Image (cartoon, grey):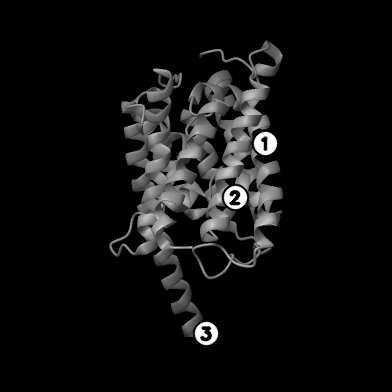
Amino acid sequence: MTATEFTPLASTLGGALIGLAGVMLFLSHGRIAGVSGIASGLLTTRPDAAWSGRLAFVLGLVAAPLLLLALTGALPAQTIAAGPALLALAGLLVGFGAVLGNGCTSGHGVCGLARLSPRSLAATLAFMATGFATVFLMRHVL
Amino acid sequence: MSPTFSLPAQFAAGLIFGLGLILAGMADPAKVLNFLDLGGIATGQWDPSLAFVMVGAIGVAFLGFRLAARRGRPVFAAAFPAPPAPRLEGRLLAGAALFGIGWGLAGFCPGPALVSLGTGSTGAVVFVAAMLLGMVGATWLSGRLRATRTQTEGAKA
């Protein structure tokens, strides 16, 4: 495993930007910025006006590291330890679970908690618990 | 405001969201996994940064949602969404539990995975493709469950 540096200031500021983006979507379109909801909303056979908006948001996400590259000449540091098979299994579970559970880390963990939603609190506690358990099993048991 | 700005506003929101994830270090799965590794507390490897991301994001969103709601209606839409429902179903918890397992396996959740597509990471492409497939599967299953429930209720009535 790769050791990472504790970055309280950058992480709080980055978090504030995530919150700001959530407020922007709420103020402009009355939409809750759940990335999984926005992404799964793209998977339809009948695209409408809201569909292009979702695509614009996702393209903004994808463009973020490219803007950083243009400004600083470097892409963000990233270590992906998982191999292709594990990534595929993880992706399946994340996509399936997010749609079944009606949200992900941003929709429940940020926007839902900010709206004091009891459902989002329950979902956040549930995915945090299984996330902790999974990493514990992977790193210290298996 | 003119709908001309609707798409650029949503692109800008995605861009700011993505830059926030990168600045926060959350585009790096290693950082997420080192937060989820509570066993790392004993060894000094634990990285509590993700908790600070949550505090920053929830703090700004908590205040921002309240200020925004004073406007009465969104700029490009008819109304703000209704307040969250208090009802809790098993499928919400089951979905969140599965989501957490996937998150813990690779350190990716939807936002950081989509951001990582922009870095040209092949791992992110694999993850996102599988994630979209999982979403299609869950949407299909939800449709089936709803149809079954309607049938059962119809039979009861």
Q: Which residue is mark 3?
A: B156
Decide which of tag 3 and tag 1 comes sooner along the chain.
1
Asked whether residue A5 appears in the rendered view, the answer is: yes
- Disc 1 residue crowd, few under 14, some 14–19, many 20+, Cα 10 Å: many
Q: Position of residue A80 (x, y in %)?
A: 42, 22
The image shows residue A89 at horizontal and vertical percentages of 39, 36
Q: How far is the residue under mark 3 from the one under mark 2?
A: 44 Å
Using the image, determine if residue A5 lies above or below residue A10.
above
The answer to whether marks 2 and 1 mark residues whose Cβ atoms lie closer than 8 Å is no
Amino acid found under the numbered disc labelled 2: Val
Q: Amino acid at mark 1?
A: Gly
Look at label 3 and name its amino acid. Lys
The chain holding disc 2 is A
**Rendered view: B47 above or below B85:** above
Q: Which residue is mark 2?
A: A23
CB within 8 Å, label 3 to label 2: no
